[in-house]
Amino acid sequence: MKSKSLEWREEGSRGIFDCKVFSIRESSCRSPDDEVRKYTIMDAADWVIVIPVIDTPRGREFVMVRQWRHGTRELSLEFPGGVFEAGENPAAAAGRELLEETAYRAGRIEKIGEFSPNPAIMSNRVHFFLAGDLECTGSQELDEDEYIEVEIMKAGDVLRGMGKPPFVHALMGSALSLYIQKTAPGLDL
Amino acid sequence: MKSKSLEWREEGSRGIFDCKVFSIRESSCRSPDDEVRKYTIMDAADWVIVIPVIDTPRGREFVMVRQWRHGTRELSLEFPGGVFEAGENPAAAAGRELLEETAYRAGRIEKIGEFSPNPAIMSNRVHFFLAGDLECTGSQELDEDEYIEVEIMKAGDVLRGMGKPPFVHALMGSALSLYIQKTAPGLDL
C-alpha cells in the first residue's frame, strides 16, 4: 500500500457457482492505488438469530436449540435462527424461526444489532433480536431434514460455555455480545 | 423428523469449486431416519483473531484495525486477525497477524476460545487470543493489497459500538463475548 485512502471501488463481478443456500462470484475491485484485483465473494440471503429469554425464580434463562451441523459434523447448541424467506421482514423472520424451532411464540421482539457474518468474503447480514413474553404453543414445526432438541439454559451458563463444545457457533457469541451491550451497557471491561 | 437421534453420518463428498481463500464441495449425509441428503459445504484454512490490550491511566484499551472489506464493500473496524499459514500453530499465527497489521509485538499471548465461523456451511475454525505486554516495533508489514489503519480504542466504547457501523464484523462480537467470559466470568446476565 502507498495510498492513504482505505476505500476500494467494485468495477464488475461475474457469477461462478450457485446452490440453494448461497452463490459465489468473482468481484473485480480497484484499489486506492488504482490497481485492479479479483476477490471471491459469497452471496446469501440475510440470516436472523433470536435470543429468547425467560425470567424464572432461578434467574434469567435462554431457550436454546441443539442440532447437527453439516459443516463441522458435530452437535451445536445455539440460539434459534435461520434464513430470511423472500420478502420477509427481519422481526417476522425472528418470530417465525423461534416458533418453528422451539414452539415458543414471542409477545415481545426487539432488534439488538446487526452484523455481517464475514465482511471479507460474504455480502449478507445477520440480524439479532431479543424475544420475551414467551408462550409455549406445544409443538415445533420442523422441516423434513431438521432434527432439533429444545433446551432451557441458565444465561450465565451460556456465557461461561461459549467457545467450547457444544457452544461452537461463532454467531452465538456475536449474539451474546449484543445481549451484554443491551443489558450491561456500563460493564467495566 | 421421526428419529429421536440428532446425529447424521457423512457418506461421501465431491469437490465443486476452488479458489485461493476457500473451496466448495457437495457432501452426502445420511439422516437419523436413514435418508440421504446433499449439503453444500465451504472448506477454508483456520483463522485467528487476537484482542490486543493496553492498560492506560484512562483504563483498558484495545488495538484495532480499520480496513475495507470486499464482501460488504464497506470499512470495518476490527480486532487484528487473518488466515493461518501452512503448518503454523494458532498462537504463532496470532502473534504474526498482530505484528504485521499493527506493528505491535505481544510479550504475552493466551488462547481464550475457539468457534466455528458457521458450522452449518463451513468446516473451519476460528481461534481467539488475548495479547498483552505490547511493544510497538514501528511499522506494519502489509501485503500488497492490504490497506490498514491502526486505532487505539477504549474497551467500553468497543462493547457499546458492536453491531453498528463501523463494528460490522460478527466475529469481533464473538471475540468480545470470549473476552467478557474471561474477564467477567461471574457477570450476572
Image (cartoon, coloured by chain):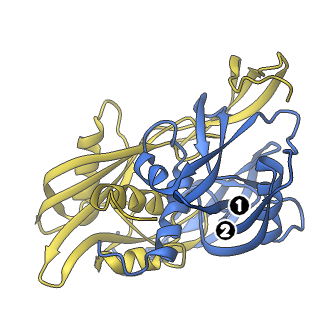
Chain colours: A yellow, B blue
Identify the residue at image location x=32%, y=56%: A185
**Which amino acid, mark 2?**
Phe
Same subunit, labels 2 and 1: the answer reads yes
Quadrant in the rendering for residue B50: bottom right
Category of crowding for the residue at label 1, using alpha-carbon neighbours closer than 10 angstroms: few (below 14), some (14–19), many (at least 20): many
Quadrant in the rendering for residue B171: bottom right
Quadrant in the rendering for residue B49: bottom right
Category of crowding for the residue at label 2, using alpha-carbon neighbours closer than 10 angstroms: few (below 14), some (14–19), many (at least 20): many
Dot 2 corresponds to which residue?
A: B129
- Residue A110 is left or right of residue B74, and the answer is left
- Residue A113 is left or right of residue A189, and the answer is left
- Residue A32 is left or right of residue A160, and the answer is right
**Which amino acid, mark 1?**
Val
Q: Are marks 2 and 1 in contact (CB under 8 Å)?
A: yes
Judged from the image, the secondary structure of the residue bearing numbered disc 2 is strand
Quadrant for the C terminus of chain B in the image:
bottom left
Q: Which mark is residue B160?
A: none
* Disc nearer the start of the sequence (2/1): 1
The chain under label 1 reads B
Image position of A167 with respect to B152: above or below: below
Q: Which mark is residue B48?
A: 1
Identify the residue at image location x=69%, y=67%: B131
Residue A45 percent location from the top left of the image: 46, 37
Quadrant for the N terminus of chain B in the image:
bottom left
The chain under label 2 reads B
Farthest residue in the bottom direction?
A: A58
Judged from the image, the secondary structure of the residue bearing numbered disc 1 is strand
Image position of B108 with respect to B57: above or below: below
